[in-house]
Image: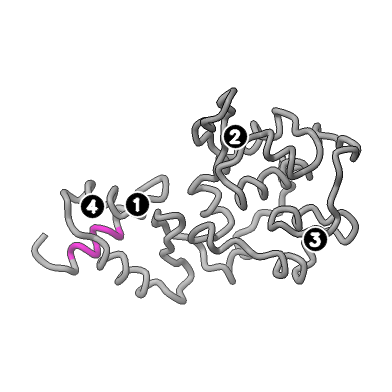
Amino acid sequence: MSAPDDLVRAVEATLFASEKPLTAEEISRHLGGAMVRSALAELAAHYEGRGIELVERGGRWHFQTAGDLAHLLRREKEDVRRLSRAATEALAIVAYHEPVSRAEIEAIRGVQTAKGTLDVLMEAGWVRVAGRREVPGRPTIYATTPEFLAHFSLSSRRDLPGIDELRAAGLLDPVDDAYALLTGGEDGDRGPNSEKEDESS
């Protein structure tokens, strides 16, 4: 590739053709080892404010519909699989505390977590097995995935909202403030005698 413009076009074409987000290293390997970070920055600036944008989520680059236009493409259909409250809480705990074991998730939630809850999150591609804790019994530990960051439009876990932001957005149950537990808060703390909730929904 003789000119920078050719490299920018090649990076653009590679991203358009890819079925999944790509790291800069993956793009570089695809283009024979070319240095692509400046080309990515140029493309991101070029698409800024347009109908589609080039974004980096969790170290991976992809094109997405501009946030203010997403409603134009949203299909009017019911989501076949909605996350249960248990799955939503488990996902939040993994995101804020990863890597975390199932026992640690249960300790934070204050109730048992059905195995199927984590299976649903892994099938969605948002949670992955991250190894085993080096303690007796060597329990499996879980972490979030780049797909989780991309789905929720997060560049990294540092972009996760804080407890005050969640409360201001009305995302915290005023009675059972489950998310407060995720950031060390004491609101709505549920003890070990809380009823086990329905995990089947």
Sequence-wise, the earlier of marks 4 and 3 is 4
Question: Which residue lies under the disc numbered 2?
Answer: 123
Question: Which residue lies under the disc numbered 1?
Answer: 23
Q: Is residue 156 left or right of residue 26?
A: right
In the displayed structure, 118 sits above or below 72; it is above
Q: Is residue 82 left or right of residue 139?
A: right
Q: Residues within 10 Å of mark 3 (few under 14, many from 20)?
A: some
- Tell me, for residue 28, which label it has, or none: 4
Task: Compute the Cα span from label 3 to label 1.
Answer: 35 Å
Q: Residue at the spot x=72%, y=41% of the render?
A: 87
Sequence-wise, the earlier of marks 3 and 1 is 1
Residue 61 placement (x, y as % from top left):
39, 57
Residue 103 placement (x, y as % from top left):
69, 34
Task: Compute the Cα span from label 4 to label 2.
Answer: 30 Å
Type of amino acid at the residue the image marks with label 2: Glu
Say which quarter of the image contains residue 161. Answer: bottom right
Say which quarter of the image contains residue 7. Answer: bottom left
Q: Residues within 10 Å of mark 1 (few under 14, many from 20)?
A: some
Residue in front for this viewpoint, 161 or 11? 161
Extreme-front residue of the structure: 136
Q: Which residues are magenta?
A: 6-12
Task: Compute the Cα span from label 4 to label 3.
Answer: 43 Å
